[in-house]
Image (cartoon, grey):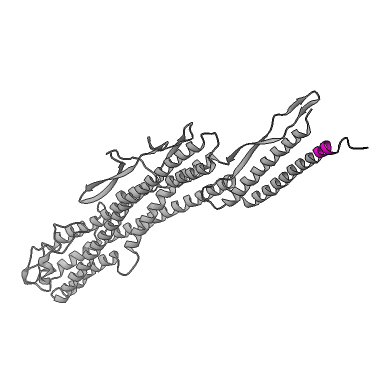
C-alpha cells in the first residue's frame, strides 16, 4: 500500500505544478502591455494512479505544457481586414492631399481663375479699343495658365512622392520577411526538445500581422513549426529563408516610376492588396485621372479660343494670330502665344477690319463659357471643372468612410481577439490568488507528511522506555 514517502512525492508534484502556474501568471501580468502577446496557461493532468486491491490510489498532478491561447479564425479575420484598411487608408490619404491642392471652394482657386478669364473677355467687349482692358485679358490669361501649371506640377510632385513610397514599403516588406525567417529558425531550434516557444511564436505572428497591412499574404505551417508566408503563389518566407522584393525603374511617357518585382528578376506582382494596392491605385489611377481632366480643360481652351481668335482682328488689323500656343495643350505646358503676350494690340476683339469699336470677337470668345464643349459636348468648361471638384469630394468622402469602417471593424476584431487571447489583469489576479492558495496547501501537505514521518521515525517505540 502507498507509504508516507509517496505522500511527499505527491506534495512535491503539486508544489512544482502550482509554482509553475504562479510563474506563468506573473509572466502574463508582466506582458499585459506587450504588443502581440497572448496569455499563457499551464496544462495539467493527474499522474498515473497506483492500483491496489481496494482500488485506485491517486498520485497527484503534473504539468504537461505551457501553451498560449490563440483563436485562428479571429487572427485570419484581423489580417483580412488589415489589408483592406491598408489599401483604403492610403487611398484616403492621397485623395485628401489632392483635394487640398484644389482647395475648393476658395478665392484664388482654379475655378475662379477660369471664371476671371472669361470675365476678362466680357470686360474687353465693353471698350474693345481700350489697351488697358486688353492687358487685363492677358493678365487673367496668365493667371489661368500659371494656375494650371501649378496644379499640374503639384499633382506630379504628389505622384512622385507616392512612387517614392514604393521603395519605402518594399524595404518594410523585406525587413519584416527577414525577421520572420530569423524567428522561424529560432523557433525550430528552441522546439527541438518538444517545448513550444510561445513568446517567439507571438512575436512572429505580430510581424505577420504588420506585414498584412502592407501586402496581402497567406500563411501555412509545416511540421517543423516553420511559418511559410506567401504573396500570391510565391513563398516570401519559407523556413529560415526569405526572398527579397525589389523595384524596377521604368520610364513611361517621360516620367520615371518604380514597379514591384522579385529581387533579381523581372517577375512582377499582380492583384496585390494592402497599402501597396492603395499606392498603385494612387500613383497609376487616382492622380493621373485628375491630371488627365486638367489636360482636357487646357486642350479645350487652346482649341476653342484659338479657333475663334485666329479669324478675328486686333488693333491695326492684326489677324491670324493664335491666342494660345497650339503646340502646348496640356495643363503642364499650356502658354499664351508669345506674339500676343508681348503685344496686346494683337488680341482679336473684332470680326471686322478697321473697326476699333467692334467687340463681336470678344463677345464670341466670352460666349464659349456657356457652350457645351466638354465631355462629348454635354458640359461647359466651368461645369466640367465643378464636376471634377464634386467627384473629388465624393471619392475623398467615400475613401474616408471605407477607412473609418475598416478601422472600426479592425478594432472590433482586435477587441474580440483580446477577450480570447489577451491578458486580463482581473483574471490573472484571481488566478494568482487561486494558485497561491493551492501552493500553500501543497506545502501544508508536505509539512503534514513530514510530521507523520517524524512520528514514525523518532517517536514510535519509545513509550515506556
* Residue extending farthest right: 464
Indicate left or right for 245 with 327 as reference.
right
Indicate left or right for 94 with 149 as reference.
right
Q: In x, y percent, where is residue 124?
A: 18, 72
* Image quadrant in which you'd find residue 8: top right
Name the residue: 14% across, 75% down. Answer: 131
Using the image as rendered, state which of residue 51 and residue 170 is in the foreground. Answer: 51
Whether residue 351 can be seen here: no
Region rendered in magenta: 452-458
Residue 292: say if magenta. Answer: no
Q: Quadrant of the C terminus?
A: top right
Indicate left or right for 129 with 185 as reference.
left
Q: Main secondary structure of the magenta part?
A: helix
Indicate left or right for 260 with 254 as reference.
right
* Image quadrant in which you'd find residue 247: top left
Name the residue: 71% across, 44% down. Answer: 439
Whether residue 162 can be seen here: yes
* Residue extending farthest top: 53
* Image quadrant in which you'd find residue 174: top left
Q: Quadrant of the N terminus?
A: top right
Q: In x, y percent, where is residue 183?
A: 45, 41
Give the total of numbered labels: 0
Q: In x, y percent, where is residue 5?
A: 75, 34
Using the image as rendered, state which of residue 101 and residue 166 is in the foreground. Answer: 166
Name the residue: 80% across, 37% down. Answer: 453
Using the image as rendered, state which of residue 173 and residue 138 is in the foreground. Answer: 173
Q: In x, y percent, where is residue 109?
A: 30, 66
Amino acid at each position: 500500500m502507498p507509504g508516507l514517502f509517496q505522500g511527499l512525492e505527491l506534495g512535491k508534484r503539486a508544489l512544482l505544478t502550482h509554482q509553475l502556474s504562479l510563474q506563468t501568471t506573473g509572466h502574463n501580468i508582466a506582458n499585459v502591455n506587450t504588443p502581440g502577446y497572448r496569455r499563457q496557461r499551464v496544462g495539467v493532468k493527474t499522474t498515473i494512479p497506483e492500483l491496489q486491491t481496494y482500488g485506485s490510489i491517486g498520485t497527484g498532478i503534473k504539468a504537461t505544457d505551457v501553451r498560449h491561447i490563440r483563436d485562428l479564425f479571429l487572427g485570419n479575420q484581423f489580417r483580412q481586414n488589415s489589408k483592406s484598411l491598408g489599401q483604403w487608408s492610403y487611398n484616403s490619404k492621397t485623395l485628401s492631399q489632392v483635394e487640398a491642392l484644389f482647395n475648393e471652394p476658395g478665392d484664388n482657386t482654379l475655378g475662379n481663375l477660369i471664371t476671371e478669364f472669361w470675365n476678362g473677355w466680357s470686360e474687353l467687349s465693353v471698350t474693345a479699343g481700350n489697351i488697358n482692358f486688353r492687358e487685363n485679358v492677358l493678365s487673367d490669361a496668365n493667371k489661368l495658365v500659371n494656375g494650371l501649371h501649378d496644379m499640374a506640377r503639384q499633382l506630379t510632385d504628389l505622384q512622385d512622392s507616392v512612387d517614392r513610397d514604393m521603395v519605402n514599403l518594399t524595404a518594410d516588406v523585406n525587413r519584416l520577411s527577414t525577421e520572420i525567417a530569423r524567428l522561424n529558425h529560432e523557433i525550430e531550434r528552441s522546439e527541438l526538445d518538444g517545448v513550444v516557444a510561445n513568446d517567439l511564436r507571438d512575436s512572429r505572428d505580430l510581424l505577420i500581422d504588420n506585414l498584412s497591412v502592407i501586402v496581402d499574404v497567406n500563411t501555412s505551417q509545416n511540421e517543423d513549426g516553420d511559418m511559410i508566408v506567401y504573396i500570391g503563389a510565391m513563398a516570401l518566407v519559407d523556413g529560415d529563408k526569405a526572398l527579397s522584393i525589389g523595384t524596377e525603374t521604368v520610364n513611361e511617357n517621360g516620367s520615371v516610376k518604380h514597379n514591384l518585382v522579385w529581387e533579381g528578376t523581372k517577375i512582377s506582382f499582380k492583384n496585390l492588396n494592402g497599402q501597396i494596392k492603395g499606392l498603385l491605385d494612387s500613383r497609376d489611377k487616382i492622380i493621373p485621372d485628375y491630371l488627365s481632366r486638367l489636360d482636357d480643360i487646357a486642350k479645350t481652351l487652346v482649341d476653342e479660343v484659338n479657333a475663334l481668335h485666329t479669324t478675328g482682328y486686333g488693333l491695326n488689323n492684326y489677324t491670324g494670330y493664335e491666342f494660345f500656343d497650339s503646340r502646348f495643350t496640356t495643363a503642364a505646358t499650356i502658354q499664351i502665344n508669345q506674339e500676343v503676350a508681348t503685344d496686346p494690340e494683337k488680341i482679336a476683339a473684332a470680326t471686322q477690319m478697321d473697326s476699333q469699336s467692334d467687340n463681336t470677337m470678344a463677345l464670341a470668345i466670352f460666349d464659349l463659357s456657356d457652350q457645351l464643349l466638354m465631355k462629348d459636348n454635354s458640359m461647359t468648361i466651368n461645369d466640367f471643372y465643378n464636376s471634377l471638384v464634386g467627384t473629388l469630394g465624393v471619392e475623398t468622402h467615400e475613401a474616408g468612410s471605407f477607412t473609418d469602417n475598416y478601422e472600426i471593424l479592425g478594432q472590433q476584431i482586435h477587441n474580440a481577439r483580446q477577450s480570447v487571447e489577451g491578458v486580463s489583469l482581473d483574471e490573472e489576479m484571481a488566478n494568482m490568488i487561486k494558485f497561491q492558495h493551492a501552493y500553500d496547501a501543497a506545502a501544508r501537505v508536505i509539512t503534514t507528511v513530514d510530521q507523520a514521518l517524524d512520528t514514525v521515525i523518532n517517536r514510535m517505540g519509545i513509550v515506556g522506555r
